[in-house]
């Protein structure tokens, strides 16, 4: 059915107003330093009085026969950022491979088991945050189990970072995270389009990335959304932040996994610190800004050394120095 000219004009006018409204809320680049300061405020001090586990016990839900690198990258990044313990809940075929990459990870081969939800649920009281999706794949059995794990995590109020195939699941069932204030979604270009289409029932306006991220967050009930790209756009439906920390032109696979794993720890730290440490800004937005800055800084540093041959493992080797440069100055 053709739109009447009047209807088209109203819609165009609304778009202009929405854009102006969202731009007013956009965090300008000159504010990046202020936001980095808020990230510094949420980082817990190292102290000899703390016991193992206090600075973070993170779970990564992902890893299947095809993808073993992604959950490894996410889980090891959580440790390198400063979590004390990092668990991976994966399909049985992936477990020996992930264990062999690293003795530092605790690996549970449970995700394709009929009792997967119970197996993960018994660990939930001991976990501070979950990262759901890296290397999960799209097998129906695994996705059904992950649905149960997400429901159990929500019931316990556990923060969840949802990435990669976890976002595929959310695009099929947005109700799974609708309105959950402790969820952060980290879509890449493709994942964002898929989610936007599923939730807002229309294509993304590529001329208005800020407005698109704002609208998706609002439509999901103010769930925090991080759209990764040349600049990362972050929104909780009220505020929009932009992270344009210098990275490089190298786009090797796995950088997003570094981001989601780091974010798992930062989300925990931010919620622990609370809004007084983030100057009234949403703790989850501050955490997300920290993870984006850190990932891009790792990419920048690794590229200085390795150029075109940079891989995600090279970036992970930079986490310590990048963290010091950004947050411990
Ligand atoms: N070592 C490992 O184990 C790793 C495993 N990984 C795991 O793989 C699984 C699937 O994840 P995914 O990201 O490949 O999935 P999906 O959303 O289907 O996108 C695929 C297609 O989208 C497109 N595309 C992407 N970006 C775009 C852009 N900016 N602009 C435009 N187009 C863009 C592009 O399409 P193409 O150019 O090929 O036509 C691309 O091929 C998931 O479990 C993840 O964790 C990864 O983490 C990497 C390391
Ligand atoms: N064009 C770009 N220029 C600079 N940085 C970018 C660009 N695209 C993505 N990034 C950065 O790379 C990191 C990962 O984003 P990317 O879009 O590659 O995620 P992804 O596709 O989920 O990665 P993965 O391969 O781990 O699945 C983010 O920190 C993002 O800021
Ligand atoms: Mg990804």
Image (spheres, rainbow, N blue to C red):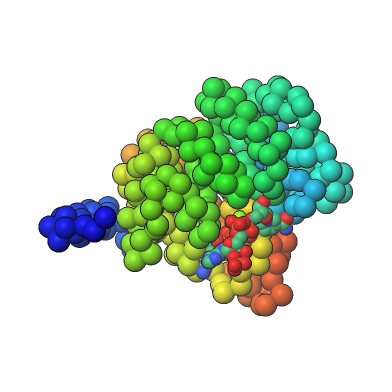
Q: Is 295 above or below relative to 95? A: below
Q: Please tell me which residue is depicted at 40% across the width and 57% down the height of the picture.
A: 203
Residue pushed farthest bottom? Answer: 308
Whether residue 177 sits left or right of residue 79 in the image: it is left
Q: Please tell me which residue is depicted at 48% across the width and 67% down the height of the picture.
A: 230
Q: Nearer the viewer, residue 263 or 143?
A: 143
Q: Is residue 184 visible?
A: yes
Q: Nearer the viewer, residue 217 or 329?
A: 217
Whether residue 257 sits left or right of residue 268 in the image: it is right
Q: Residue 70, how many percent across, how many down?
A: 70, 52
Q: Residue 129, how many percent across, how many down?
A: 59, 35
Q: Please tell me which residue is depicted at 55% across the width and 37% down the height of the picture.
A: 160
- Assign ligand 3 to one image quadrant: bottom right
Residue pushed farthest front? Answer: 1
Q: Count of labels shown?
A: 0
Q: Please tell me which residue is depicted at 81% across the width and 36% down the height of the picture.
A: 109
Q: Is residue 286 visible?
A: no
Q: Is 76 above or below relative to 89? A: below
Q: Residue 142, how many percent across, how many down?
A: 70, 37
Q: Is 147 above or below relative to 297? A: above
Q: Nearer the viewer, residue 72 or 220?
A: 220
Q: Nearer the viewer, residue 45 or 39?
A: 39
Locate the N terminus and report the quarter of the image it occupies.
bottom left
Q: Residue 229, how many percent across, how many down?
A: 49, 63
């Amino acid at each position: 059915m053709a739109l009447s000219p009047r209807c088209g004009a109203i819609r165009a006018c609304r778009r202009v107003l929405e854009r102006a409204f969202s731009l007013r809320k956009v965090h300008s680049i000159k504010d990046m330093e202020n936001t980095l300061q808020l990230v510094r405020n949420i980082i817990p001090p190292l102290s000899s009085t703390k016991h193992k586990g206090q600075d973070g016990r993170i779970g990564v839900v992902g890893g299947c026969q095809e993808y073993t690198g992604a959950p490894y990258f996410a889980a090891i990044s959580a440790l390198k950022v400063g979590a004390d313990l990092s668990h991976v809940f994966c399909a049985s075929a992936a477990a020996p491979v992930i264990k062999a990459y690293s003795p530092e990870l605790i690996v549970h081969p449970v995700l394709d088991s009929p009792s997967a939800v119970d197996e993960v649920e018994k660990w939930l009281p001991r976990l501070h945050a979950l990262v759901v999706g890296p290397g999960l794949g799209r097998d129906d059995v695994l996705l059904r189990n992950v649905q149960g794990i997400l429901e159990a995590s929500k019931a316990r109020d556990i923060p969840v970072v949802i990435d990669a195939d976890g976002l595929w699941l959310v695009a099929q069932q947005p109700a799974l995270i609708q309105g959950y204030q402790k969820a952060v979604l980290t879509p890449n270009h493709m994942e964002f389009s898929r989610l936007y289409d599923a939730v807002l029932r229309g294509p993304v306006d590529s001329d208005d990335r800020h407005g698109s991220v704002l609208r998706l967050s609002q439509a999901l009930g103010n769930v925090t959304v991080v759209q990764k790209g040349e600049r990362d756009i972050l929104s909780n439906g009220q505020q929009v932040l932009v992270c344009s920390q210098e990275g490089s032109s190298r786009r090797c696979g796995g950088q997003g996994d570094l981001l989601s794993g780091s974010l798992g720890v930062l989300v925990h730290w931010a919620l622990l610190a609370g809004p007084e440490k983030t100057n009234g800004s949403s703790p989850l937005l501050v955490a997300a800004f920290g993870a984006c800055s850190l990932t891009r800084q790792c990419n920048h540093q690794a590229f200085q050394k390795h150029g075109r041959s940079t891989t995600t493992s090279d970036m992970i080797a930079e986490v310590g120095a990048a963290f010091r440069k950004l947050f411990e100055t």
